[in-house]
């Protein structure tokens, strides 16, 4: 039965750190395209079923660029232009130009070639972690350094500057950052990458940023935007998947035991953790470019639609077995953790390679790994666009 009253807000409160809010299950069953009021008071739609989420993300009648429009604005025409190079916020054909330049940098083949470097970085971080006396924070000791080192190596960013870009990146994805803090962090990131672009032009090295500079196809402003986007996305998401994935396995001992008994399950386990945890916790915004119908609902031109990846990945209509359970042996089926459509995550093969290398080596190196505090005391990233843990104290 369809509820005629809009949701007062998008569900955000979790009863379990690994599950999306329980209201999503009810919405999938009863009102998969639900009217909702957003925090700014504007009205829109919340989409929760797998197939509907794929439709919203894959149909060109739903715009990414126009999701930047002013809250409560009259329609798509008042959308501001995305910052140069921020192709994640562009529609085709503008988006296509950037995607074409970058696709070759993140192929499955190139990620396989990168695997030995990833494994070396993982081993070095574990060696350092093993020397610790007492509990360590897995985030700072391992989960954050691994993808940060890898993306720095790929982009040609000095790892010595990690504290600056990690701090600014965290401010950008934090929900409670003030507009001034957000703008300052964004300006600092852009200034940081701009200096790198200038240095790559003078003295190119073997990295993605140098290749983009040498291609001559992008302006300096566009190069800066691409660099900022890749640097933030390249470490924020994977770092949280490694830490949260480790915590999840430690809290599911039967699944951890199955993985230890049969390490060949790791590829499946990575996909299952990506599906089960889905760290883009509040979904993806789109705006309808015309009047259209979605699963029986009439969506007006200019309406904001939020597609919930986390809910779609728990849809029983799509998944074999219990979608609410973690099952590292579950046969892999297409999930939404990397999105869908033309904006599907460019670095997904890199993320898979990093997660597989990191989790395999961590579990092998520390067979008695366990949480050093009660699970209730682990600080969760409820306040961030990218979900995960702020800290993960572990011992062995």
Image (cartoon, helix red, strand yellow):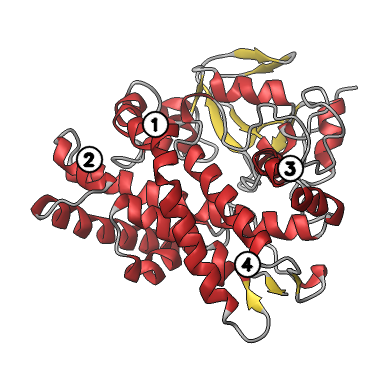
N-terminal of the pair, mark 1 or mark 3, is: 1
N-terminal of the pair, mark 3 or mark 2, is: 2
Q: Is the residue 302 above or below the residue 280 in the image?
A: above
Question: Could you say which disc has been placed on residue 90 in the image?
Answer: 1
Question: Could you say which disc has been placed on residue 390 in the image?
Answer: 4
Q: Residues within 10 Å of mark 1 (few under 14, many from 20)?
A: many
Which label lies toward us, 1 or 2? 2
Where is mark 2, residue-wise? Answer: 212
N-terminal of the pair, mark 2 or mark 4, is: 2
Which label lies toward us, 3 or 4? 3
Q: Residues within 10 Å of mark 4 (few under 14, many from 20)?
A: some
Q: Residues within 10 Å of mark 3 (few under 14, many from 20)?
A: many
N-terminal of the pair, mark 4 or mark 1, is: 1
N-terminal of the pair, mark 3 or mark 4, is: 3
Q: Quadrant of the N terminus?
A: top right
Q: Quadrant of residue 180?
A: bottom left
From the top left corner, tell me how far across and down residue 314 is, in percent. Answer: 78, 35
Q: Nearer the viewer, residue 41 or 13?
A: 13
Q: Is residue 107 visible?
A: no
Q: Which residue sits at x=64%, y=65%?
A: 365
From the top left corner, tell me how far across and down residue 3 is, in percent. Answer: 85, 27
Q: CA distance from mark 4 to mark 1?
A: 31 Å
Q: Nearer the viewer, residue 390 or 207?
A: 207
Q: CA distance from mark 3 to mark 4?
A: 19 Å
Which label lies toward us, 2 or 4? 2
In the image: residue 223, left or right of residue 146: left
The reply to whether callout 1 and callout 2 are in contact (CB within 8 Å) is: no
From the top left corner, tell me how far across and down residue 46 is, in percent. Answer: 70, 32
Q: CA distance from mark 2 to mark 4?
A: 33 Å
Question: Could you say which disc has been placed on residue 276 in the image?
Answer: 3
């Amino acid at each position: 039965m369809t509820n005629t009253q809009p949701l007062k807000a998008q569900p955000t409160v979790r009863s379990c750190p690994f599950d999306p809010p329980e209201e999503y299950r009810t919405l999938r069953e009863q009102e998969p395209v639900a009217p909702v009021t957003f925090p700014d008071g504007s009205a829109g739609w919340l989409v929760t079923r797998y197939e509907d989420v794929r439709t919203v993300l894959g149909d060109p009648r739903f715009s990414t660029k126009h999701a930047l429009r002013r809250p409560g604005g009259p329609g798509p025409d008042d959308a501001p232009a995305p910052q140069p190079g921020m192709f994640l916020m562009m529609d085709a054909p503008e988006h296509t130009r950037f995607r074409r330049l970058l696709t070759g940098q993140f192929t499955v083949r190139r990620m396989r070639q990168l695997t030995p470097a990833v494994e070396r970085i993982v081993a070095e971080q574990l060696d350092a972690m093993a020397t610790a006396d007492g509990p360590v924070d897995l985030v700072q000791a391992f989960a954050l350094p691994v993808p940060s080192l890898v993306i720095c190596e790929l982009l040609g960013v000095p790892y010595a500057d990690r504290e600056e870009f990690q701090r600014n990146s965290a401010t950008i994805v934090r929900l409670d950052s003030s507009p001034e803090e957000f703008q300052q962090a964004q300006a600092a990131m852009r200034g940081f990458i701009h200096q790198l672009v200038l240095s790559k032009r003078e003295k190119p090295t073997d990295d993605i940023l140098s290749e983009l500079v040498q291609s001559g196809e992008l302006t300096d402003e566009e190069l800066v935007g691409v660099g900022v986007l890749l640097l933030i996305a390249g470490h924020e998401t994977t770092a949280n998947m490694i830490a949260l994935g480790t915590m999840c396995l430690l809290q599911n001992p039967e699944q951890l035991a199955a993985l230890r008994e049969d390490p060949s399950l790791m590829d499946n386990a990575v996909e299952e953790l990506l599906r089960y945890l889905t760290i883009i916790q509040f979904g993806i915004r789109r705006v309808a470019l015309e009047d259209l119908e979605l699963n029986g609902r009439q969506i007006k031109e200019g309406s904001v639609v939020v597609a919930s990846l986390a809910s779609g990945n728990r849809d029983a209509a799509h998944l074999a077995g219990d979608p609410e359970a973690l099952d590292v042996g579950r046969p892999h089926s297409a999930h939404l953790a990397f999105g869908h459509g033309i904006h599907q995550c460019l670095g997904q093969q890199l993320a898979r390679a990093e997660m597989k290398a990191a989790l395999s080596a961590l579990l092998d190196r520390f067979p008695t790994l366990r949480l050093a505090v009660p699970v209730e005391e682990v600080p969760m990233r409820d306040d961030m666009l990218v979900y995960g843990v702020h800290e993960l104290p572990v011992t062995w």
